[in-house]
Amino acid sequence: MIVGIDLGTTHSLIGYYSEEGPKLFRNALGDTLTPSVVSVADDGHMLVGAAAQDRLISHPQASVAAFKRWMGTARETQLGPRVFRPEELSALVLRSLLADAEAALGEKVREAVISVPAYFSDAQRKATRAAGELAGIRVERLINEPTAAALAYGLQERKEGSRFLIFDLGGGTFDVSVLEMFEGVVEVHASAGDNYLGGEDFLDALQTACLGDLKLRGDDFSPVERGLLRRKLELAKRTLSQQLEVRIEGLIGKHDIAWHIDQERFAHLADPLLQRMRMPLERALRDAHLRPEQLDEIVLVGGASRMPLISRLIARMFGKLPLRHVNPDEAIAFGACVAAGLKSRNAKLDEVILTDVCPYTLGIDVSQRGEQGHVQHGIFSPVIQRNSVVPISRESSYYPISERQTKLTLQIYQGENPMVENNIKLGELDIPLNPTLSIQQNEVMVRFTYDINGVLQVEATPKISGFRHEIVLQQNPGMLSDDDIRTRLAALSELKIHPRSKQENIALLARAERLFEEHLSARDVLQQWITHFRQILETQDHRLIQEHRQNFSGALDSLETQL
Ligand code: ADP
Ligand code: MG
C-alpha cells in the first residue's frame, strides 16, 4: 500500500487510491485536515494536530507551527527538554498521519508519495525525504504540489497542448505554476510565487482594520488575548467566504468588542494583497511565454483560495472562471493519492503523467577577463536554466583563467542573480589541472544532472585526461547525513505518543485549557469541568468516558459561542 500525503505548512492530509478513486483518511477527531502543529505535554508526551494547535495558545513555549518553512535548514526548536530539527517535527506530523491511515486500513504503511512546493530546493527536498525516513517510511517519490493539483482534476487526460495555471494560496505561501500537456505528459513549465503571502496576511488586514475601528492597539492585549481576537477574526474571515457580512463580539481581556465587516470592505482591505499576487502570476506567464487567454484552465487550490475575492481577481485577470470544484484544501492530497495509485498499479507514472521542472537556475562561479585584461570575479554562469523540464543533463566547457593554474575550483550555486554572491552556494569541487598545458588544452567539461527527485549531480572531466570528478553536496549545513538519520530515528522512536484511542480526550482537554487561558471570566467553571473530566478518565470505564466526553464537548461548544 502506497499512501499519498500533502505535508502542508498549515495543514497536512493523507489518503490512498481506492477502487473508487482517491480517498482521504480521517484523523481521530474525524477531520481530513490535521493542523501541522507539534507540542510537548507536561508529562512529556508528544502531541500533533488540533490539541497541539490549542496548546500554541495555552503553552506557547512548548508548541511549534509552520516549521515547513525551515525545512532544509539546521534551525532547531526547543520543546520541553529536547531540541528538534525541522525534519523531526515533520516526521512527527507524518507519524500521526500514518497512524490514522493504519487505523483505517488495518495494516502497516511502508511507502508514500509526498507533495512538495515546486520551488523547493535540493536541500528542502532532501529534508522532506529525511522526514519520511524518520517517520519509518520509504518516500517512493516527491511530487510537485501543482502537478498533484492537476492530477486531482484529471487534467492529464486533456488534449495535447492544453495549458493550465495552478493558483495555490495556503496559510502563508502563494504559489503559481503553469503546466502544459506535451506528448501525453503534464509538464510544469514555469513556477513563481511569494513565500510570505497567504491566508494569514488577509487575517492581518482584518485585524488591523478591527483594531483601528475600535481605537485599540495590539499592545492593549496580552499575547493570549491577541490569540483569542485572531481566532474570532479567523472565523469571521471564513464566514465572509460564504456570507455578505459578519459580526464579532465578546469580552477580550478588559475590552468589550463589537465589530462588523462586510465582503465589500474586506475586498477593499485586501486590495494591496491582491496587487502583490499579480506579480508572480505575470512572471509565471512570462516564463512560460503565454498570454492569459492561451490558458485552457485555471485551477484554484489552497484553503485561502476559498475567498470569493480570489475568484474575482482571476476572472478579471484572465477573463474566465477558475476550476474549484475539488475542495481546495484537499486537492493536493487527492493528487498525491492519484500518483500513489498509479505507482502501486505499476502504471508508467514517470513516463505518462509527470514531468516537473527545476524551479531555479543552477550554475557555477566564473571569472572573466575584460578587454583591458582585468579580471572580474564572482560571475554566475548558469548550466541548467530555471524552469527546465527534469530530468535534465547539461554540459558546458570551462577553462582556467590563467596559464600554469594547478587546479580549477568549481563553486556550485543556485539562484537567479548574475552575481554569485546573491545566490545560494550548494558546494564546491576541486579539479586538478596540468600546469604545463595551455589554457585551451586544460578544458574541463562540466555536466550538471538534475533528476526527478531534485537531486543534483555535478561531474567535471578534464578533456585531456578523461578522469571524472564528481561532487558530493553534503556540505550543506541544513542536511542530515545517513548516520544522523539513523541515530535520530532511534531517538524519535523513544518519544512518548499517546495511543490514537486517547486522542479525542486529549484534544478536548487541550481545548478546555486553551479556553481557560483565554477567558478569565470562565475560569472557575472550566477548572471544575477539567478536574471532573480528568477524574472520569481515571476510571478507565470506556462507556462512562464517552458519555462524559460528549457532554464536556457540548458544554465547551456553548461556552465558546457565549464568550
Ligand atoms: P497550507 O497549504 O499552508 O497548509 P491550506 O491550504 O490548508 O494551507 O490553507 C490554509 C489557509 O486557508 C488559512 O490561512 C485559512 O485561514 C484559509 N482558509 C481555510 N478555509 C477558508 C475559508 N473558508 N475562507 C477563507 N480562508 C480559508
Ligand atoms: Mg498547501
Image (cartoon, rainbow, N blue to C red):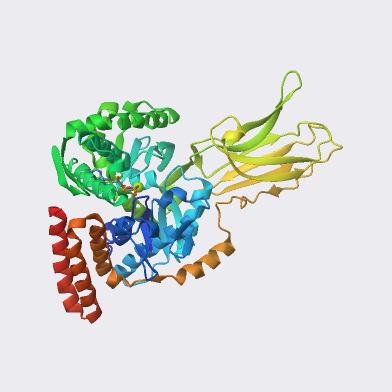
Q: Nearer the viewer, residue 530 or 439?
A: 530
Q: Nearer the viewer, residue 233 or 464?
A: 233
Q: Is residue 319 above or below residue 17?
A: above
Q: Is residue 162 above or below residue 466?
A: above
Q: Nearer the viewer, residue 53 or 531?
A: 531
Q: Please state the total of marks drawn on the protein image.
A: 0
Q: Quadrant of residue 402?
A: top right
Q: Is residue 165 above or below residue 99?
A: above
Q: Quadrant of the N terminus?
A: bottom left
Residue 139 screen position, x and y as percent: 46, 59
Residue at the image position 17 percent from the left and 57 percent from the top: 521
Task: Give the residue furthest to the top.
Answer: 372
Query: Horizontal placement of 504 versus 355: left or right?
Result: left
Q: Quadrant of residue 3?
A: bottom left
Residue at the image position 14 percent from the left and 63 percent from the top: 555
Residue at the image position 44 percent from the left and 64 percent from the top: 135
Query: Horizontal placement of 481 versus 203: left or right?
Result: right
**Does residue 346 appear in this view?**
no
Residue 123 screen position, x and y as percent: 53, 49
Residue 407 screen position, x and y as percent: 78, 41
**Does residue 471 appear in this view?**
yes
Query: Horizontal placement of 110 versus 551: left or right?
Result: right
Residue 222 screen position, x and y as percent: 30, 49
Task: Give the residue furthest to the right.
Answer: 436
